[in-house]
C-alpha cells in the first residue's frame, strides 16, 4: 500500500512539473539620458489596470505577475532620449527608444 502511495505521489509530481506556467513575471524598465520621465503609462496588473506616473526618476522599473495571454504595454515621455523594455520571466520581449518618447507592448508568453 505504501508503494502505491509513493507511486501516486511521484506520478502527480511529474504531472505538475510537465504543466506550463500560466502566470509569468513581467518587468518594465525605463531608462534614458534625462534624470526623470515626464510621464510613464503602463498596464500594472493582470486585470489590465492602467497606471500613470508623473516625474518618475530614471532609471525606473516595475514588476508584477501576469497571466499567459495578457497584453502588456508601457509608454514613456521625456525631455531627452528614452528607452522602454518589457521582460517576461527575465527574457526581453519588447523594447523601443526615441528622442522624447518610447512605447512597447507584447503578449505575455
Image (tube, rainbow, N blue to C red):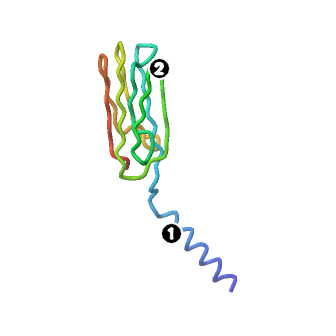
SS at badge 1: helix
**What residue is drawn where x is 37% and y is 28%?**
84
Q: Position of residue 16 (x, y in %)?
A: 52, 66
Camera-side residue of 49 and 62:
49
Q: Residues within 10 Å of mark 1 (few under 14, many from 20)?
A: few
Q: Nearer the viewer, mark 1 or mark 2?
A: 2
Q: Position of residue 91 (x, y in %)?
A: 42, 40
Q: Position of residue 10 (x, y in %)?
A: 59, 72
Q: Residues within 10 Å of mark 2 (few under 14, many from 20)?
A: some
Task: Residue under label 1, please give it.
Answer: 15
User: Is 64 on the left-hand or right-hand side of 108?
Assistant: right
Which one is earlier in the sequence, the residue at label 1 or at label 2? 1
Camera-side residue of 81 and 20:
81
Q: Position of residue 26 (x, y in %)?
A: 45, 41
Given contact means CB atoms under 8 Å apart, are the residues at marks 1 and 2 in contact? no
Reply above or below: 47 against 53: below
SS at badge 2: loop
Point out the image quarter for the N terminus: bottom right
Task: Residue under label 2, please give it.
Answer: 58
Reply above or below: 10 against 68: below
Reply above or below: 71 against 9: above
**What residue is drawn where x is 32% and y is 33%?**
104
Q: Residue furthest bottom?
A: 1
Amino acid at each position: 500500500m505504501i508503494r502505491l502511495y509513493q507511486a501516486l505521489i511521484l506520478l502527480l509530481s511529474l504531472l505538475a512539473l510537465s504543466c506550463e506556467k500560466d502566470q509569468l513575471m513581467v518587468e518594465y524598465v525605463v531608462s534614458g539620458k534625462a534624470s526623470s520621465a515626464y510621464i510613464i503609462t503602463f498596464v500594472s496588473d493582470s486585470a489590465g489596470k492602467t497606471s500613470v506616473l508623473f516625474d518618475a526618476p530614471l532609471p525606473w522599473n516595475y514588476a508584477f505577475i501576469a497571466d499567459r495571454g495578457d497584453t502588456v504595454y508601457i509608454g514613456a515621455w521625456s525631455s531627452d532620449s528614452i528607452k522602454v523594455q518589457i521582460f517576461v520571466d527575465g527574457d526581453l520581449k519588447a523594447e523601443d527608444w526615441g528622442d522624447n518618447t518610447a512605447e512597447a507592448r507584447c503578449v505575455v508568453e
